[in-house]
Image (spheres, rainbow, N blue to C red):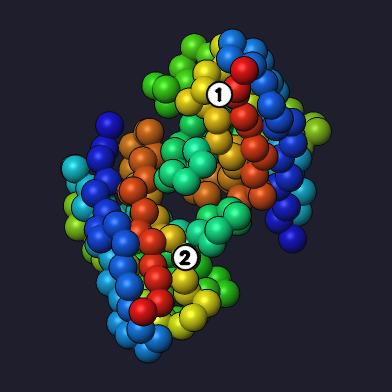
């Protein structure tokens, strides 16, 4: 059974940093691209970032480019999102999802507030 | 960026009704379109991929059609458990943009 479990969310002050993790199981992690998608409270879904299976290709939404860094460790079956210079508008539930978003984690809430 | 215009933004229907949601892309995306269902407090669930293919385990009352710029999502006979918000998403070009969502309620 495919499982994606996010962790690392929490309350952080504006300008602060946070690192999200996504632990994958039930499939060959190293064979699939992975994505981060977020959802602000009461709002719709927003694609944040994608990384190819071997980390050769990495993409970001304009809203996070230069502040967020996606990475993965195929040996640990894990996906990461390093978030720096956080802003109030980054407050959201962050989901990791596999390739074409067939599988999603349960999400982790990031709150940016003073 | 490709804009996805989804309509309506909300919809009220009765159990047993046929429900249709549309999604229009700002440029040709072939059939690179997903439809998701999201219930409150839960992650989105993939229902339809490649515009018209039913994901494994999803009831056959759900269907999708279209290609190019115009797409349709249909529930043939609305059930109480279908109350949710539905989203389309294109994956032809990055960023993989989502529609604004359609909140479906029971009348």
- Say whether residue B74 is visible: no
Residue found at the very far front of the displayed protein: A114
Left or right of residue B72, residue A103 in this image: right
Q: Residue shown at 52%/77% (left/top)?
A: B81
Q: Which residue is mark 2?
A: B84
Closer-to-camera residue (A13/B35): A13
Mark 1 secondary-structure assignment: loop
Percent x, y of residue B23: 26, 56
Residue hosting label 1: A56
Q: Are marks 1 and 2 on the same chain?
A: no
The residue positioned 46% from the left and 83% from the top of the image is B79
Q: Nearer the viewer, residue A87 or A107?
A: A87
Tag of residue B80: none
Q: Chain of mark 2?
A: B
Q: Nearer the viewer, residue B46 or A30?
A: B46
Residues B104 and A24: in front is B104
Does residue B13 appear in this view? Answer: yes
SS at mark 2 in the image: strand
> In the picture, which quadrant includes the N terminus of chain A?
bottom right
Q: CA distance from mark 1 to mark 2?
A: 37 Å
In the rendering, at what x and y percent does residue B75 appear? 36, 77
- Residue drawn at the location 40% of the way across and 77% of the way down: B106
User: In this picture, is B65 found above or below B4?
Assistant: below
Mark 1 is surrounded, within 10 Å at the Cα level, by few (under 14), some (14 to 19) or many (20 or more) other residues, namely few
In this picture, is B58 found above or below A103?
below
Identify the chain of the residue marked 1, using the numbered disc in the image.
Answer: A
Residue A19 image point, x, y percent? 70, 23
Q: Residue A79 at x, y = what percent?
A: 68, 32
Q: Quadrant of residue B98?
A: top left
Residue visible at 44% across and 38% down in the picture: A46
Residue that lies at the very extreme toward the right in this rendered image: A76
């Amino acid at each position: 059974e495919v499982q994606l479990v996010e962790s690392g969310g929490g309350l952080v002050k504006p300008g602060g940093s946070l690192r999200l993790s996504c632990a994958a199981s039930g499939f060959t992690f190293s064979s699939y691209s992975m994505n981060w998608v977020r959802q602000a409270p009461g709002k719709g879904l927003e694609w944040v970032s994608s990384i190819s299976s071997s980390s050769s290709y990495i993409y970001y939404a304009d809203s996070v480019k230069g502040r967020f860094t996606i990475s993965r460790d195929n040996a640990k079956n894990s996906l990461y999102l390093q978030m720096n210079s956080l802003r109030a508008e980054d407050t959201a539930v962050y989901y990791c999802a596999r390739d074409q978003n067939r599988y999603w984690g349960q999400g982790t809430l990031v709150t940016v507030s003073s | 960026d490709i804009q996805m215009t989804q309509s309506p933004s909300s919809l009220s229907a009765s159990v047993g009704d046929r429900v249709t949601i549309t999604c229009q892309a700002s440029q040709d995306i072939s059939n690179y379109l997903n439809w998701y269902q999201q219930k409150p407090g839960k992650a989105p669930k993939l229902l339809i991929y490649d515009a018209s293919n039913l994901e494994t385990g999803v009831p056959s009352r759900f269907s999708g059609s279209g290609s190019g710029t115009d797409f349709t999502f249909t529930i043939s006979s609305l059930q109480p458990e279908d109350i949710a918000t539905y989203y389309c998403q294109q994956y032809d070009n990055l960023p993989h943009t989502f529609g604004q969502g359609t909140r479906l309620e029971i009348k």
